[in-house]
Image: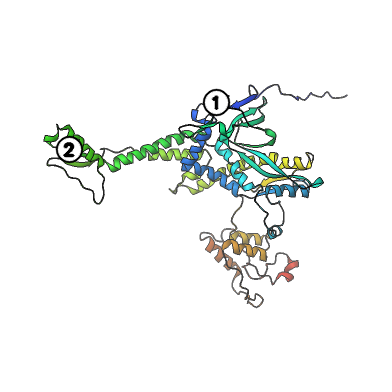
């Protein structure tokens, strides 16, 4: 008996946006935003001020962006052919995962002028954290002839947030296109903000040629959500408190010059005005002086009582602004506290940074890598994968860790590893005049040597009592990890 199948829904009955069409200067993008300074597009100028004027805001964005830019990005074949993988890697200027490093290092670096730079693009893509969105236009150039014709990525041209006037969104929430105002259609207001004044649109960019990075967007809202949105209130109050603190320092720190007239001058308004001008013009210094008639007095008066100290409130708002990015460790400020707790908090921060990197990677994979493959090889061709190292996964290799890896047979010392360790630790190269074959073997206890070295690196630990595996000291002979290779490798100089 045949089973009855359920019909699969293939069309949408619901919607994300109430009406399809242009959403921008003429329509609201985020119906829940109530703060005037944060309603797009005015929010672009507000977030720019926050980053440029506040050190804590700037440090929060750098704490997220720099690890993402610093980690290693690669192209993984992911089932794609070698030709496709090499083509994508060449377009993005990234290495291929698993490629021989020595072979890659032996090749001269490619020319960079007129070519796409992933590092520069990544820096600009991270602007989505500041504004909630970052938009780029794909631009290619044609190379080769006949069957070898290829569309090579020339650049991903940024389309600045301040130039975007409309987001054309479909009823299902998908982006249709964006529109830019022509440069001549902008008017600069007295406070320095450029706003569109209307006129014909000369830059309508369809979504097919765009790469749009969004930070935690709401459905159908293509401006995204700025990372700085929760920090706005604290930035606003901190800015006001810092102005009050500066005014209080001037009023209480400098004081107000006061001249008291004598009895005969008290009713002379002209003399009173003259004394006021003298007090206002008074300036301290090595040659400063003041001449007064008999009975007149001069003092520099300061307000009585304890002045208000806004410093604690400023520090509170600083701490709250760091919390918007889970950057709790920025609040230590060298004032002590539990650094073990800070390490635990940093783990959560590292995970959040990795999530941001994953979001950028997913967008770049779909709209850069796969577009490159579709244009040049067809939509049925498997596409390579853009990957990056886990943020914070790289750890410094200490001497104790290297010894444990060698003892476990997971690492085999060789001249290449020795050269890397010498370079990484700033040690000099091997002495070319030394003859390792004629040097006498050490007659001391190998385990004692290991203990001594570990104690020098870690004064509060002991390899005998902490459960570490004791291994032979470093001699100029390769340790016997694989017995078959022992006879042919005895003369190799190593660190062990």
Q: In terms of secondary structure, where does tag 1 sit?
A: loop
Residue 159, by quadrant, is top right
Quadrant containing the N terminus in the rendered view: top right
- Can you tell which quarter of the image residue 138 is in? top right
Can you see residue 252?
yes
Q: Residues within 10 Å of mark 1 (few under 14, many from 20)?
A: few
Residue 441 lies left or right of residue 7; in this view the side is left
Q: Count the numbered circles shown.
A: 2
Identify which residue, 301 or 277, lies in the foreground. Answer: 277
Tell me if mark 2 has few (under 14), some (14-19) or many (20+) residues whose alpha carbon lies within 10 angstroms of its own.
some
Q: Is residue 238 above or below residue 113?
A: above
| Nearest to the observer: residue 1 or residue 103 | 103
Q: Position of residue 189 (x, y in %)?
A: 48, 31
Looking at the image, which residue sits at the far front? 184
Q: Earlier in the sequence, mark 2 or mark 1?
A: 1
Colouring rule applied to residues: rainbow
Residue at 87% from the left image edge and 24% from the top image edge: 2
Q: CA distance from mark 2 to mark 1?
A: 60 Å
Q: Which residue is mark 2?
A: 260
The picture quadrant where one finds residue 171 is top right
- How far across and how far down the image is residue 156, in percent? 65, 42
Camera-side residue of 273 and 315: 273
The residue carrying mark 1 is 32
Give the left or right position of residue 330, taking residue 363 as reference.
left
Q: What kind of element bears circle 2?
A: strand
* Horizontal side of residue 385 vs 52, given as left or right: right
């Amino acid at each position: 008996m045949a089973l009855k199948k359920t019909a699969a829904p293939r069309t949408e009955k619901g919607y994300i946006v109430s009406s399809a069409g242009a959403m921008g200067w003429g329509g609201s993008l985020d119906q829940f935003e109530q703060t005037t300074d944060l309603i797009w597009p005015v929010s672009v100028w507000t977030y720019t001020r926050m980053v440029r004027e506040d050190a804590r805001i700037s440090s929060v964005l750098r704490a997220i962006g720099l690890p993402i830019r610093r980690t290693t990005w690669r192209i993984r074949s992911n089932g794609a052919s070698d030709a496709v993988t090499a083509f994508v890697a060449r377009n993005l200027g990234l290495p291929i995962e698993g490629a021989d490093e020595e072979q890659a290092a032996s090749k001269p670096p490619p020319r960079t002028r007129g070519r796409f730079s992933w590092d520069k693009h990544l820096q600009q893509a991270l602007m989505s954290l500041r504004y909630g969105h970052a938009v780029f236009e794909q631009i290619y150039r044609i190379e080769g002839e006949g069957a070898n014709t290829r569309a090579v990525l020339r650049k991903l041209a940024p389309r600045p947030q301040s130039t975007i006037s409309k987001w054309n969104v479909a009823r299902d929430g998908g982006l249709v296109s964006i529109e830019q105002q022509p440069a001549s259609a902008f008017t600069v207001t007295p406070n320095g903000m450029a706003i569109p004044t209307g006129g014909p649109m000369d830059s309508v960019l369809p979504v097919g040629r765009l790469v749009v990075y969004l930070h935690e967007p709401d459905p159908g809202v293509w401006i995204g959500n700025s990372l700085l949105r929760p920090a706005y209130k604290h930035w606003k109050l901190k800015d006001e408190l810092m102005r009050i603190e500066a005014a209080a320092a001037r009023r209480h720190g400098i004081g107000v010059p006061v001249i008291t007239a004598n009895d005969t001058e008290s009713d002379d308004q002209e003399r009173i005005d003259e004394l006021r001008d003298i007090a206002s013009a008074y300036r301290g210094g090595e040659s400063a002086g003041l001449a007064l008639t008999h009975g007149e007095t001069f003092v520099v008066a300061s307000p009585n009582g304890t002045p208000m100290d806004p410093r604690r409130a400023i520090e509170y708002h600083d701490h709250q602004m760091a919390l918007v990015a889970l950057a709790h460790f920025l609040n230590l400020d060298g004032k002590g506290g539990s650094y073990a707790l800070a390490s635990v908090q940093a783990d959560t921060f590292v995970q959040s940074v990795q999530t941001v990197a994953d979001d950028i990677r997913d967008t770049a994979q779909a709209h850069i890598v796969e577009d490159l493959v579709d244009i040049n090889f067809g939509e049925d061709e498997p596409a390579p994968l853009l990957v990056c190292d886990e943020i914070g996964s790289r750890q410094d290799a200490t001497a104790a860790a290297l010894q444990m890896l060698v003892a476990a047979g997971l690492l085999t010392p060789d001249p290449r590893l020795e050269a890397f360790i010498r370079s990484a630790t700033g040690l000099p190269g091997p002495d070319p005049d030394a003859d390792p074959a004629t040097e006498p073997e050490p007659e001391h206890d190998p385990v004692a040597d290991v203990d001594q070295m570990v104690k020098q690196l870690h004064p509060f630990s002991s390899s005998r009592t902490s459960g570490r595996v004791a291994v032979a000291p470093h001699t100029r002979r390769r340790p016997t990890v694989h017995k078959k290779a022992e006879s042919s490798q005895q003369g190799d100089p190593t660190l062990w």
